[in-house]
Image (cartoon, rainbow, N blue to C red):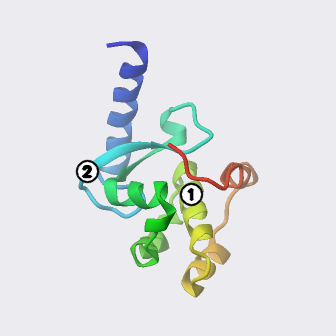
Amino acid sequence: MDKGDIMDTTVKHELKVRSDSCCELCGSSNNLRVFKVEPSLGSIDDSIIICSECEEQILDESKLDANHWHCLNETIWSDVPAIQVMAYRILRKIDNHEWSRNLLDMLYLEDEVMSWAENTNKFKN
């Protein structure tokens, strides 16, 4: 096992502990994986743990289902910057819905977190 594998395993373990083994976006406990919030060094601070359904919608915008993302109503209150960044980015992608615009209006991000959130308009992993 090389240093990168050890780091990935450690990050995944720490993320599972932080999230209580639930998707940090929607709360599902199914098929969890590490998602690096770009730009990312792959650390726990710039990664989140998400389920396969969230990942699929993030990576393929044609599969974005706005109804799935009603969960962000709770997620936007997270104190974890990487989660805040992803919630912001997703809400921006579906801001043609009044409820998502309302959530964006309520969302407060520190300047450096907002800069990170706006750093890219594409989802990457």
> Which of the two labelled residues, at mark 1 and mark 2, occupies the earlier sequence position?
2
Mark 2 surroundings within 10 Å by alpha-carbon count, few (fewer than 14), some (14 through 19), many (20 or more) = few
In the image, residue 9 sits, relative to residue 29, either above or below, namely above
- Pick the residue in front: 58 or 30: 58
The residue most toward the top is 2
* Element assignment for label 1: helix
- Residue at image mark 1: 84
Answer yes or no: do the residues labelled 1 and 2 have beta carbons within 8 Å?
Answer: no
- Residue type beneath disc 1: Gln
Above or below 64: residue 29: above
Q: Which residue is drawn at the image coordinates 71% and 49% (left, top)?
A: 119
Q: How far from the left and from the top, in percent, is residue 123?
A: 56, 52
Instruction: State whether residue 71 is above or below residue 52.
Output: below
Query: Could you say which is closer to the camera, residue 21 or residue 122?
Result: 122
Quarter of the rendering occupied by the N terminus: top left
What element does badge 2 sit on? loop
Q: Residue at x 50, y 42 (%)?
A: 125
Q: At 63% from the left edge and 80% from the top edge, which residue is drawn?
A: 101
Q: Amino acid at mark 2?
A: Asn
User: Where on the picture, by quarter, is residue 68?
Assistant: bottom left
* Cα distance in 3D space between marks 1 and 2: 21 Å
Q: Determine which residue is flagged by label 2.
A: 31
Q: Position of residue 62 (x, y in %)?
A: 48, 66
With respect to residue 123, does 97 lie above or below? below
